[in-house]
Image: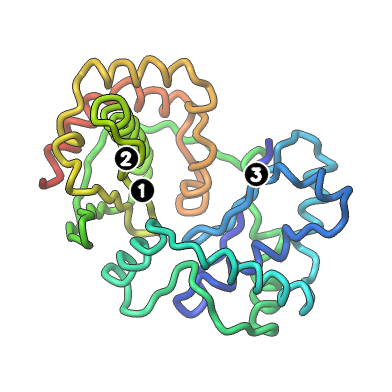
Amino acid sequence: MYYIYIYTPFYNNWNYIPHLIEHCVTNIKSEKDYFLYNNLKASCNTFCTYFILPTKNKKYLNDFIKKILSPINNNLIKYEHNVIKDENKTYNFEIDLVNKIWKKLYWNRVNFNQNWKLSYNKTKDYHKKYYTKENIIILENNIKYFDWEIKTNFKLFNTFKINKEIVYVFNHNMIDFYILIQISDLINEYISYKKRYFEEEYYRHETIFWDYKDYIFLSINKDSLNLYKNINESFIDNFITYNLKNKDYLNVKYFDWTSMLLYWYTLSNNDKKRIIVNLKEYYLNFINVIKF
């Protein structure tokens, strides 16, 4: 696989234009291209757009880079604008929560994945500015590893409530970022296990993990607090054992883009492995830092 990332910041406190361009550059018209790009994964996050190509073929990679850097036209922009309007009809709890958290943390007006008045020139200017060869990170070609002393120092910046969610905001650093990813996954697995097989619930509130430059935040539903803070040791041991055998999990390339974009290097696989091995210690540290 190839993991491709482009720095795409908000435009006037909105992510609509970056989101629209992500749609435009992955638009497929021909049947041949449909099957070629059908398994492509693409998404626009808070300050980055990523593309995951399910191939190791360099020609495929080069053709795709050429495609996303090619100018976009008004017809394409208008078409994908209508697609996004249809996409946004469905209520998304996570996006709604993120919008509210953004307003608390940064500014009064911020809109994440909400419709915006269409501007062809602004969209094309943004694409021309950020979709350049110099602004692309291809992890397989550009990734840089750095060996760290894995030592967590969770710094809780803020805590607040939004409806039934308790949001914990941490200062951003690379070590805690990776540790909190594992803690979030551990909590979600435990909630899924307990709710589904012991409490007769199919749908459950899991944690929401997000980050943006200065901060990492983890949102926890208050109705499940007792579960979150009382994960038994045997479950943590089984979580560790399973994930140490899972090579894809150890790579965690899906999250390396944050490290590369913010710090220009990322943790080695050995360091990621050490985080998983010592997860019980980090989880207890996490529980002591946050306030229930």
Report which residue position mark 2 lands on: 180
Name the one closer to the observer, 241 or 253: 241
Amino acid type, callout 2:
Leu
Distance CA(mark 2)–CA(mark 1): 8 Å
As drawn, 53 above or below 43? above
The quarter of the displayed image where residue 282 is located: top left
Q: Residues within 10 Å of mark 3 (few under 14, many from 20)?
A: some
Distance CA(mark 3)–CA(mark 2): 23 Å
Report which residue position mark 3 lands on: 52
Circles 2 and 1: CB distance less than 8 Å? yes
Circles 3 and 2: CB distance less than 8 Å? no
Q: Give the label on residue 209, or none.
A: 1
Q: Secondary structure at mark 1?
A: strand
Q: Residues within 10 Å of mark 2 (few under 14, many from 20)?
A: many
Q: How is the image coloured?
A: rainbow
For marks 2 and 1, the one nearer the N-term is: 2
The quarter of the displayed image where residue 26 is located: bottom right
Name the residue located 38 percent from the left edge and 52 percent from the top edge.
Answer: 210
Amino acid type, callout 3:
Ile
As drawn, 20 above or below 236? below
Amino acid type, callout 1:
Phe
- Estimate the x, y position of residue 232 in percent, counting from the top left: 19, 22
Name the residue located 36 percent from the left edge and 35 percent from the top edge.
Answer: 185
- Estimate the x, y position of residue 214 in percent, counting from the top left: 34, 59
Name the one closer to the observer, 39 or 92: 92
Q: Give the label on residue 245, or none.
A: none
Q: Secondary structure at mark 3?
A: strand
Name the residue located 49 percent from the left edge and 20 percent from the top edge.
Answer: 246
